[in-house]
Amino acid sequence: MNLTLRIWRQQGPDTPGEMTEYRVSGISEDMSFLEMLDTLNEELILRGERPVAFDHDCREGICGACGMVINGQAHGPERTTTCQLHMRHFRDGDTIDVEPWRAGAFPVVRDLVVDRSALDRIIGSGGYVTAPTGSAPEAHATPVPKEAADLAFEHAECIGCGACVAACPNGSAMLFTAAKVVHLNVLPQGAPERASRVRNMVGTMDEEGFGGCTNTGECATACPKGIPLSGIARLNREFLRS
Amino acid sequence: MVMASATRTNRATRTPAPGRHPSSPASLWHSSVGKKAVMAVSGLVMLAYLVAHMLGNLKVFFGPDDINGYAHWLRTIGEPFLQHGWFLWLARLVLLAAVLAHGTAAYQLSRRDLRARPVKYVHRRPRATYATRTMRWGGVILGLFVVWHVLDLTTLTVNPAAEEGHPYQNIVASFSTWYSGAVYCLAMLALGLHVRHGFWSAAQTLGVNNPRRDRALKLGANALALLLTAGFLSVPVAVMTGLVR
C-alpha cells in the first residue's frame, strides 16, 4: 500500500505545531498502525530528519500507552487501540490525518505525545482502596455478589488511554472517572470510602480542567475497552448520593 | 520489616483527606456534575410546565369561551387560601428561577467545556446527533423566544389585538401575522430538538438511567418531544389555515 500521511509535528510544549505531509510506500495490510509509523520513522532517520514521536508500550492493546486521533477518530476507525489497528482498514492511496489527543488537560509534549498525568492525579485522589496491604486475602473472606463483580470487571477494563477525553467534544474525563469510581464503589472493599472517593475524584477532574459531560456518547463509542455510557449515569448517581 | 515499609508508603501517599471536597450545596453547585444536576432538575420543572401549557393551549379548539374561561380559572386556583392571581405569580416565580438556574449553569458549563478543548482537530467530522449538537444555540434561541412570547401573549406589548383577559382573540390576532407564526413555529421545532436530547440527558445526569431503561427513556424523550411540538404547533397552524378564527 502507498499512503499519504498528514501528521501533527510539534517540537515541544511551547512551540507551535503544524500538519506535515509524508508519503510512505510498501506498507503491508497486516502491519499495525504503529508499525506503519515505525516504517515512516526509519525512512525519516535515514534521511536525517527527526522521527515522529508517539507513545507506545505493549502493542497488545492492554497497556493504554498508545493513542492518536486518526482521521478525526480516537484510535482510528476500529474500536480498538492504535497498536491493534491494522492497515487493512485503509485503502491504497488513502490520505490519513494523524493528530495528538486534544484537550486542555493533555498538553502536547512532542508531536503525537501528550502528557496524561492529569488522569493519574484523578486516580491519586481516590482510585484506590485504603486498606492495610500485606498478603492477598483469602478469596472467600469477602463475598461479592455476581452482579457487582460483573459490573466491577466491566468498568475495571479501563486502561486509561484517554481516548474518551480525546473523542469528547468537551474534552471531558467523565467516562474515565466513571470507570474508576464504579469499579471500586460497587465492590464491598470499596464501600467504606464510597462517598469521599467520588467527591474527591470528580473534584480533581474539575480542577484539572477537563470539560463537563453533555451526554453526546462520543466517549463510549471511541473507548477501545467498551466502557459503557451507563457508567457515567452511575457516576452521577454516586456523586449525588454522596 | 516488609509490612512496616508497606504501611509507611501507604501513609506517605495517602492523598487528600476525605474532607477536601465536602458534601454541601455550595460544592454541588461548584462541581461540573452538580451543575448538570441543577440543569436537569430545572429542565424537568420547565418540561412539566410545558406539558400543562400545551394541553391548556388545545382548549383553543373548543372556542373562545372555553379557553378564555380556562385562563380566568387559572387565576382562581388556590382561592380562598391564595388571593386572586397568586397561584399564577407563584408559578411564574418558580419558572423564572428555573430559567435562570438552567441558563446560568449552561453558560458556565459551556465556558468550561470550550476551555477544555483549546485546540480543535484539523480533521473534522460530524459528531453526535443534530439534537445533541444544537443544545447550546437551541437553548439561546428558546430563551429569546420566551422573551418575545411573554411580550406577545402575556404583557400583550407587541400583540396586535391586546385585549386583556381574552387570550383567544389575542392568539388569533398574533398568529394572523406571518412573522409571529413563523417565529413560533421555528421556536417549537427548536423546542422539540432540545427536549429530545434534554429529557434523556436529564435521566443520565440524575443517574436514573441504566442499560435496561435506556431504550425506554430514549423512546420517551422522542415521544415527549414529538407530542409537545405537535401540540404547540397545532394552534398557529390552525389559525393560519383558518380553522381557528
Image (cartoon, rainbow, N blue to C red):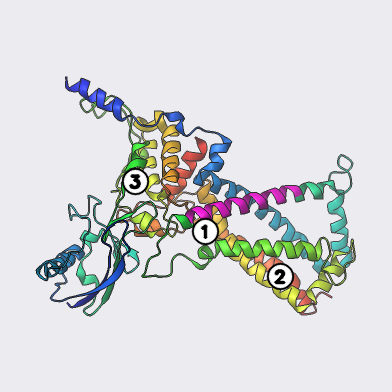
Disc 1 to disc 3, C-alpha distance: 31 Å
How many numbered circles does the render carry?
Answer: 3
> Where does the image place residue B131, in percent across and percent down from the top left?
53, 65
Please indicate whether residue B182 sits to the left or right of residue A214 in the image.
right
The residue shown at (41%, 40%) is: A201
Please indicate whether residue B164 sits to the left or right of residue A78 in the image.
right
Q: Which residue is mark 1?
A: B218
Chain label for disc 2: B
Disc 3 to disc 2, C-alpha distance: 46 Å
The amino acid sitting under disc 1 is Lys
Point out the image quarter for the N terminus of chain B: top left
Residues indicated by labels 3 and 2 sit on the same polypeptide chain = no
> As displayed, is residue B114 above or below residue A143?
below
Q: Are marks 2 and 1 in contact (CB under 8 Å)?
A: no
Magenta residues, dominant SS class: helix
Magenta residues, start to end: B93-113
Q: Which residue is mark 2?
A: B184
Q: Is label 3 or label 2 in front?
A: 3
> Where does the image place residue B16, in percent across and percent down from the top left?
39, 31
Which one is in front, A27 or A110?
A: A110
**Disc number placed over residue A119 in the picture, else none:** 3
The amino acid sitting under disc 2 is Tyr
Chain label for disc 3: A
Q: Earlier in the sequence, mark 2 or mark 1?
A: 2
Label 1, secondary structure: give it: helix
Q: Which class describes the residues within 10 Å of circle 1: few (<14), some (14-19), or many (20+)?
A: some
